[in-house]
Amino acid sequence: MSKRTSIGSWAFTIGPYASHPIDFQTVCEKLKALGFDGVELGAFPPHPNPGNPNGPDDAWPGAMPERSQREELRARMKEWGLEFSGIAANLWGEKLINTADQSKYIAEFRKNSEFCRDVGIQGIRVDCVQPPTILREVDYATAMQRVVKTWQECCAIAAGNGQYVTWEVEPGFAFNKPSDAVRIHDAVHRDNFGIQYDTCHGQMVAVVGARQEGEKETYPSQVDYIRMLDGRINHIHLIDSDNTCHKDAQGNDETSSHPPFGAGLLNFDEIMPALVKAARCPHDWWTIDLCFYPDAWTATATCKAALDELIRKYGA
């Protein structure tokens, strides 16, 4: 069976698009015209989301706290002929590592899981929320215990709603070394938990070692990292890498840049066979991620063509 295609909607709402986001309907209509099968939802304003984590939803763009609103969204997706490949839950306002009380994080995760249940989304993305420098304030063992325990609770919530949880390991958040990915995944030890593998983040985590605290942990190729993750990958993002990080407002490295296919240096003919072999995805989606790319709207069409070619070669 051939893979289904989607793209993360956050590419059109954050970073360079934060001041002029592209509305969700326009995004979906363009994706349908380009032949995509679905969209991966960035569940934060102005795109559809479960509501404001900090209070009233009145002025929160895209908020859908009511079941009726969610049913309408589901109906519109059907009209557009698209499906959701997953969700990036808005958990960045919560504390995960630098607090002994993760109840607010878990409550917000639950709200996102219920939203996913209502609109028909099966996969929920998470990350470690705090930057890698947090490990200067919280010792490694304590930080890991907090992450593992919290995600075990989140996995139970997701399982109750028929969903899986996928952790995107990337330079911008704590536990961004290859061995961290294996260690935490195996400690969570839940059937519905896995690693979201992004080929750009894989390059920056495993080959460049971007923003790693302490001694660098790198390999000659991200293929070595992919092999480490054998059987642990449950969601896939595909995009190029130029070995650089996106810069924050102060000009410091934040997380991986996501240049379009062909604008970086990745050898997908080397990466894809290893990735296909190592992945154990409970679905057939391959997703493009153009996060922070300044001209993502224009690049979407060429990226779709490149993704189609990867599917032709490796996605059967």
Image (tube, grey):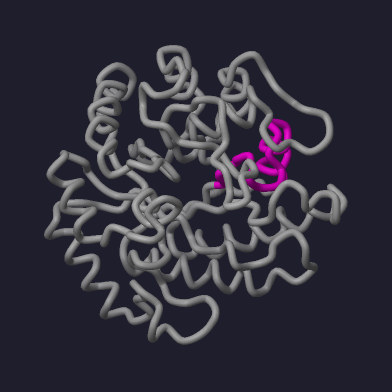
Return the residue found at the far front. 250
Give the camera-side residue of 5 and 16.
Answer: 16
Q: Is residue 177 above or below residue 40?
A: above
Q: Is residue 129 above or below residue 157?
A: above
The residue at 29%/73% (across/down) is: 70
Residue 183 inside the magenta-drawn segment: yes
**Residue 307 visible in the shown view:** yes
Query: Where, quadrant-wise, is the N terminus in this rendering?
Result: top left
**Residue 1 visible in the shown view:** no
Q: Image check: 296 left or right of 160?
A: left
Give the camera-side residue of 277 and 221.
Answer: 221
Q: Is residue 162 above or below residue 305?
A: below
Q: Position of residue 156 (x, y in %)?
A: 58, 61
Quadrant of res 62: bottom left
Residue range highlighted in magenta: 167-187
Q: Image check: 205 left or right of 259?
A: right
The residue at 47%/33% (across/down) is: 280
Residue 195 inside the magenta-drawn segment: no
Quadrant of res 184: top right
Q: Image check: 26 left or right of 233?
A: left
The residue at 52%/70% (across/down) is: 110
Query: Where, quadrant-wise, is the C terminus in this rendering?
Result: top left
Quadrant of res 137: bottom right
Q: Position of residue 220 (x, y in %)?
A: 64, 13
Q: Position of residue 182 (x, y in %)?
A: 68, 35
